[in-house]
Amino acid sequence: MMTKPETQRTAGRAKARGKASAVLSSSDQVAAYIRNGVRRGRYVPGQRLVEADLTLELGVSRGPVREALKRLAAEGMVELHRNRGAAIRQLTRRKVNDILAIQEHLTGLAARLAAEHIAEGDHGARFQAAVDALFAARDRGNTAQVFETRLRFYEELVAIGGNQELARFVPIPETNIIRAQFEHHLPARVRARNYQDYETVARYILKGKAKAAEAAMQRHLRMVRQAYERLGDEVYARD
């Protein structure tokens, strides 16, 4: 027979589990879990997302899982197939080229706006922290942290610019998939050039040189697009 303190502790643990379960049962949490999985390399393009596995991993029912998968499909991160279920989206050569062409102009604009607003408030410190975190992750050779800190770099860049509509149009979900699908296929010299470009863009932004920041970011995206164009057809999904 339990004593009163033991009964209270047991009830407290059950209550805590109930609260955690309520949080995890949200489709928002399921969607965030899958997004983070793509960012960190836990999920790769083409990998199936099995509803039963997700319910066990997250301790949720199938309803929130299905709702999250539908939302991610609308975002472009997941593909839903009638007979095969859900899978992380694989991109075709044409789709990658189209996404990067859009990103070249939108991210260039984001870099220009960030440079124009970098002197306001704590913008400079925030952006410098994002840059430092990215290069620290590179130096540690931690792929998951590189994905995470590079995403933070771009998110801070867009946020500092202050254009709320721009944040809706920069194709971040698709960009995450591009990185997950192709990053390890890029030659080492291209990956090294990426960081040189990040350093150049960051320097112009922190100095408030708006036009130079925009031009440097656009050059970077053109270089990336050309690098992907040189990859073989076997790394792309079929049209």
Image (spheres, helix red, strand yellow):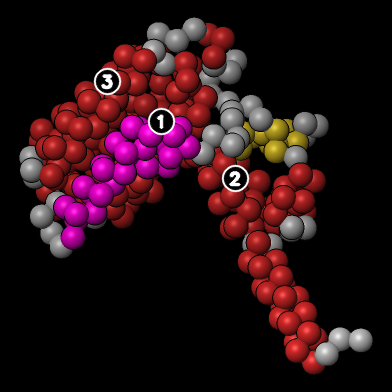
Q: Which residue is mark 2?
A: 34
The kind of residue tagged 1 is Gly
Closer to the chain start, of discs 2 and 3, is 2
Q: Of discs 3 and 1, which sits in the foreground?
A: 1
Image height check: is 55 above or below 38?
below
| Marks 2 and 3, how far apart at CA | 30 Å
Q: Is residue 5 left or right of residue 160?
A: right
Q: How many marks?
A: 3
Which residue is more in the foreground, 66 or 189?
A: 189
Residue 193 - label: 3
Q: Residue at x 33, y 32 (%)?
A: 139
**Distance between the alpha carbons at the discs numbered 3 and 1:** 16 Å
The reply to whether the magenta stretch includes residue 139 is: yes
Depicted 91 relative to depicted 17: above or below: above
What's the CA distance linking mark 1 and mark 2?
23 Å
In which quarter of the view is residue 236 placed?
top right
Q: Which residues are magenta?
A: 122-150
Q: Quadrant of residue 206?
A: top left
Q: Which residue appears at 7% of the width and 40% of the height? A: 209
Mark on residue 141?
A: 1
Q: Mark 3 near mark 1, Cβ–Cβ under 8 Å?
A: no
